[in-house]
Each structure stands twice: as structure tokens, then as C-alpha cells.
Image: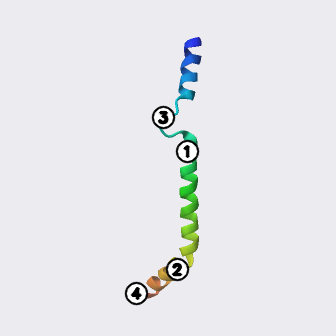
Amino acid sequence: MTAILTRLRDCLKDDRGVTLVEYGIALALALLVGTATLTALGGEIAAALGVAGAEMPN
């Protein structure tokens, strides 16, 4: 049992590599930037798709 606790304590002290928290922050930032970009360009994208749809034959 003490070996497991020792190993767990060593893993928690190990600060090499990217932690789960840092991955979460990166994911949240990527989602925020993606959402902001799509929101900002949404009107232009809708207009471009409308024009393209109007040009297509029935």
C-alpha cells in the first residue's frame, strides 16, 4: 500500500510535459477563438452561400 502511495505522490510531483489542466485551457481557448471567428464571419458566409445557391440551376 505504501508503494502505491509513494508512486502516486511521485506522479503528482512530476511537472514534466503538459498537464490535463493545460490541455483544458488550450481547448477552451481554441473553442473561444473558433466561436468568435464563426460569429464574426457568419453574415458573410451566409451571404456567400445565398449567392451560390441563387446561381445554381433548379
Q: Earlier in the sequence, mark 2 or mark 4?
A: 2
Q: Nearer the viewer, residue 55 or 34?
A: 34
**What is the three-letter code of the residue carrying label 2?**
Glu
Residue that badge 4 annotates: 57
Q: What x and y, as percent, mark residue 13?
A: 56, 28
Q: Residues within 10 Å of mark 1 (few under 14, many from 20)?
A: few
Q: Are marks 1 and 2 in contact (CB under 8 Å)?
A: no
Name the residue beneath numbered marker 1: 22
Disc 2 vs disc 3: which is toward the camera?
A: 3
Q: Which mark is residue 44?
A: 2
Q: Are marks 3 and 1 in contact (CB under 8 Å)?
A: no
Looking at the image, residue 17 sits to the left or right of residue 39; the answer is: left
Disc 3 marks which residue?
16
Q: Alpha-carbon neighbours of circle 4 within 10 Å: few (<14), some, or many (≥20)?
A: few
Cα distance in 3D space between marks 1 and 4: 50 Å
Say whether residue 33 is visible: yes
Q: Amino acid at mark 3?
A: Arg
Say which label, 2 or 3, has the lower sequence index: 3
Q: Residue at x 55, y 62 (%)?
A: 33
